[in-house]
Image (cartoon, rainbow, N blue to C red):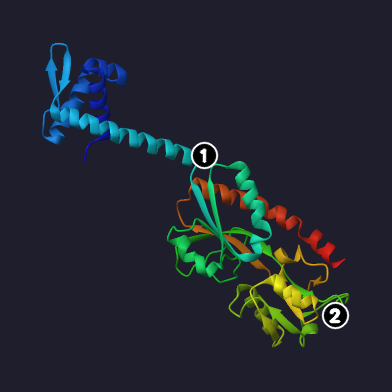
């Protein structure tokens, strides 16, 4: 394979018409330029430069290689410029997947902050369930996936919370915050104004739940029910919290909703905490283990910045909803 440095030397010799002038332009000595040309000729197996009284001339092979070297070096310079821009976040892209409830709550704040700081980076955001997109993160088809699963893994996050199960995949899960789960009731429910509410008090309640028993949110709910020996009566299943809250407002029954949804709950729904509280779902950012691009690093920084701000506003919003 041809050495790029020697191609640069040949290009400068062609431009300057002499070894000494090329040496000055490159900051080399004249013998160093001669050695580079001689080595290049040995590599390609043909003579490239002819010594003449007024300097040097290129052979036909030398002119051919110098012309091709010009194209190659220009492309390399373009690549170098692009890489420098990429490192400075003056270009590049970030492909991110988020789960539905985060897309309507904390994610827009993160995207706005990212665009303000790095407007030249192309953002591509999609909404999907974490189990569906983690293989894409592992394959490099996605850069970041926000997750809301509470699964068992061998390693603990730095906060002491467990990250979602990687199932042997080479992924890192960066812990962001816990998202509490609350109960949504119709305003005229007999327990809507109870001073304290326990899951047992709702044992006979019809429940509207998000999707199926395999949903991460519902796994938390069923675990809590099993802990107090309750078999919940499921009246409706649908993976859309807005629809579930519509049923709640109509008086069909109760629903379990995360804090992300509770903050913007409709006025005809009452949000109640349980005592003891339901398990919270940990929110994490899944990225490929090892190398992280500048854009990935920048987004993780923003997400970790936003986490305490988001958590800090949680109870004020909930108190406003309950009042």
User: Residue 74 is drawn in which quadrant?
Assistant: top left
For the point 57% across and 42% down, the residue is: 118
User: Residue 319 is drawn in which quadrant?
Assistant: bottom right
Q: Residues within 10 Å of mark 2 (few under 14, many from 20)?
A: some
Mark carried by residue 189? 2
Position of residue 263 relative to residue 294, above or below, is below
- Asked if residue 154 lies left or right of residue 41, the reply is right
What is the residue that sits farthest to the left in this orientation? 46
For the point 50% across and 48% down, the residue is: 93
Relative image position of residue 67 (x, y in whole percent)? 23, 30
Which sits in the foreground, 309 or 44? 44
Q: Residues within 10 Å of mark 1 (few under 14, many from 20)?
A: some
Secondary structure found at label 1: loop
Relative image position of residue 274 (x, y in whole percent)? 78, 74
According to the picture, the residue beneath numbered tag 1 turns out to be: 90
- Asked if residue 299 lies left or right of residue 311, the reply is left
Report, in whole angstroms, how far the alpha carbon at label 1 lies from the one at label 2: 55 Å
User: Residue 80 is drawn in which quadrant?
Assistant: top left
For the point 13% across and 25% down, the residue is: 59
The quadrant of the image that shows the N terminus is top left
Which sits in the foreground, 153 or 261? 261
């Amino acid at each position: 394979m041809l050495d790029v440095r020697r191609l640069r030397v040949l290009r400068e010799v062609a431009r300057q018409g002499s070894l000494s002038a090329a040496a000055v332009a490159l900051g080399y000595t004249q013998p160093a330029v001669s050695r580079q040309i001689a080595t290049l000729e040995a590599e390609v197996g043909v003579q490239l430069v002819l010594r003449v009284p007024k300097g040097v001339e290129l052979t036909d092979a030398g002119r051919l290689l110098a012309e091709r070297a010009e194209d190659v070096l220009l492309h390399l310079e373009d690549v170098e410029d692009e890489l420098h821009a990429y490192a400075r976040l003056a270009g590049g892209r970030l492909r991110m997947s988020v789960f539905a409830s985060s897309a309507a709550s904390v994610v827009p704040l993160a995207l706005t902050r990212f665009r303000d700081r790095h407007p030249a980076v192309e953002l591509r955001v999609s909404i999907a369930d974490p189990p569906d997109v983690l293989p894409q993160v592992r394959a490099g088809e996605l850069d970041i996936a926000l997750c809301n699963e509470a699964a068992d893994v061998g390693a603990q996050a730095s906060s002491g919370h467990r990250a979602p199960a990687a199932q042997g995949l080479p992924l890192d899960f960066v812990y962001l915050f816990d998202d509490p789960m609350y109960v949504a009731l119709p305003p005229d429910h007999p327990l809507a104004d109870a001073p304290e509410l326990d899951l047992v008090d709702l044992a006979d309640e019809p429940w509207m739940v998000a999707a199926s028993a395999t949903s991460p949110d519902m796994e938390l709910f069923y675990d809590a029910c099993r802990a107090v020996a309750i078999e919940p009566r499921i009246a409706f299943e649908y993976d859309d919290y807005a629809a579930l809250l519509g049923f709640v407002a109509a008086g069909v029954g109760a629903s379990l909703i995360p804090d992300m949804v509770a903050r913007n709950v409709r006025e005809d729904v009452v949000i109640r905490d349980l005592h003891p509280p339901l398990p919270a779902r940990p929110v994490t950012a899944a990225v490929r283990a090892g190398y992280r691009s500048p854009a990935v690093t920048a987004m993780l920084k923003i997400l970790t910045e936003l986490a305490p701000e988001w958590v800090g506003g949680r109870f004020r919003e909930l108190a406003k909803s309950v009042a």
